[in-house]
Image (spheres, helix red, strand yellow):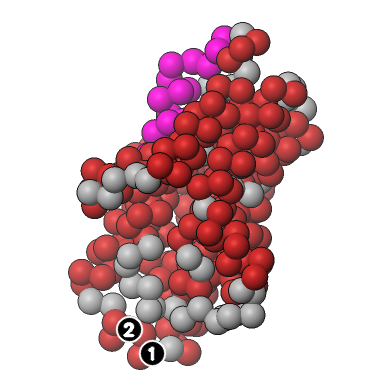
């Protein structure tokens, strides 16, 4: 796959993930709970992805030989972090404006640096430290701290939001190292199976779902949209494109989620986003770009190269 094709696919996946706040907030407004929405979206995602996966297995039967028990288990563990991110991120939006919840999710930038320092003993460079500092300053503005924005932040909302940043960081670290030679259309269903199992453990379907859910059309619309954007298209597109992109460049492209989510909160949910919050969002994006300038250079001047 050519680099610019991978960039386009990854960017589309990040864009779709940025739409999630709209659908979860509308689902809450319609009276559905966090557990109901998560369980239904997991069921939909499993059905769609395994339909795709079975077709892919028939087309690539040799790929099965690469799937040892350890590999499958590792993929499911990686996917469980996606499920946990879904629960924590959507849960934070029960207590916070969507524009604030997504800012907390984006703390995965410095959380990822912390994980690499602790797990892999990779001490952050000076440039990385600057990136983290700018990100944290951007968070203060994005949260509108200087204009009393802290009043909108509840403790449980903050804990759920920052928890989603930790689980998302864990997903990025783990998933980028497991079975990258297996086709994305086979790898993704296995990962989302892990995500669904974790969701089903937290919200057992037999106690979460009832007859009224299956007869109602609205939850299938909202949960279906969330499944499509959060558990189907985004993981598939990331799995297809990330093997052909440097990790630094993927980080930059993933930042597309932030302005999309804030814009969705402003336009689709009619949330007031103060100018200082927009400045904070821009500062976070600038921090990512500064920290990954080498990746930007590669995009601008090495487009025609193939990445193997």
In the picture shown, does residue 45 fall above or below 109?
A: below
Where residue 276 appears, as percent x and y from the top left, is 69, 22
> Is 113 situated above or below 61?
above
Q: Which mark is residue 298?
A: none
Out of 70 and 298, give the one closest to the viewer.
298
Local crowd at mark 1 within 10 Å, few (<14), some, or many (≥20)?
few
Query: In the rendering, at what x and y percent does residue 283 appear?
Result: 62, 34
In the image, what residue occupies the spot 73% across and 21% down? Answer: 274
Which of the numbered marks, if any, corresponds to residue 61? 1
Is residue 91 visible in the rendered image? The answer is no
The N terminus, quarter of image: bottom right
Main secondary structure of the magenta stretch: helix
Residue marked by disc 2? 64
How many labels sit on residues? 2
Q: Which residues are magenta?
A: 149-167
Residues at marks 2 and 1, CA–CA distance in whole angstroms: 6 Å
The residue at the point 73 percent across, 38 percent down is 263
Which residue is most to the front?
A: 126
């Amino acid at each position: 796959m050519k680099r610019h094709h991978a960039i386009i696919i990854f960017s589309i996946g990040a864009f779709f993930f940025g739409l999630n706040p709209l659908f979860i907030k509308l689902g809450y407004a319609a009276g559905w709970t966090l557990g109901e929405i998560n369980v239904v979206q997991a069921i939909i995602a499993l059905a769609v992805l395994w339909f795709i996966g079975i077709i892919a297995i028939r087309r690539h039967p040799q790929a099965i030989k690469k799937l040892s028990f350890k590999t499958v288990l590792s993929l499911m563990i990686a996917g469980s972090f996606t499920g946990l991110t879904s629960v924590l991120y959507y849960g934070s939006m029960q207590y916070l404006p969507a524009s604030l919840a997504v800012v907390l999710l984006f703390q995965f930038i410095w959380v990822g640096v912390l994980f690499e320092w602790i797990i892999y003993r990779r001490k952050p460079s000076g440039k990385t430290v600057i990136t983290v500092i700018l990100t944290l300053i951007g968070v203060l503005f994005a949260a509108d701290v200087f204009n009393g924005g802290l009043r909108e932040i509840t403790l449980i909302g903050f804990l759920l939001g920052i928890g989603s940043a930790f689980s998302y960081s864990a997903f990025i670290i783990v998933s980028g190292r497991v079975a990258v030679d297996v086709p994305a259309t086979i790898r993704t269903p296995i990962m989302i199976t892990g995500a669904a199992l974790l969701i089903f453990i937290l919200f057992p379907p037999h106690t979460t779902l009832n007859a009224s859910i299956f007869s109602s059309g609205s939850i299938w619309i909202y949960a279906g949209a969330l499944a499509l954007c959060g558990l189907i298209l985004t993981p598939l597109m990331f799995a297809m494109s990330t093997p052909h992109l440097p990790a630094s460049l993927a980080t930059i492209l993933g930042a597309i989620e932030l302005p999309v989510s804030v814009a969705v909160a402003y336009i689709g949910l009619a949330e007031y986003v103060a100018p200082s919050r927009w400045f904070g969002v821009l500062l976070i994006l600038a921090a990512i770009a500064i920290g990954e300038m080498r990746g930007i250079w590669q995009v601008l001047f090495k487009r025609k190269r193939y990445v193997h």
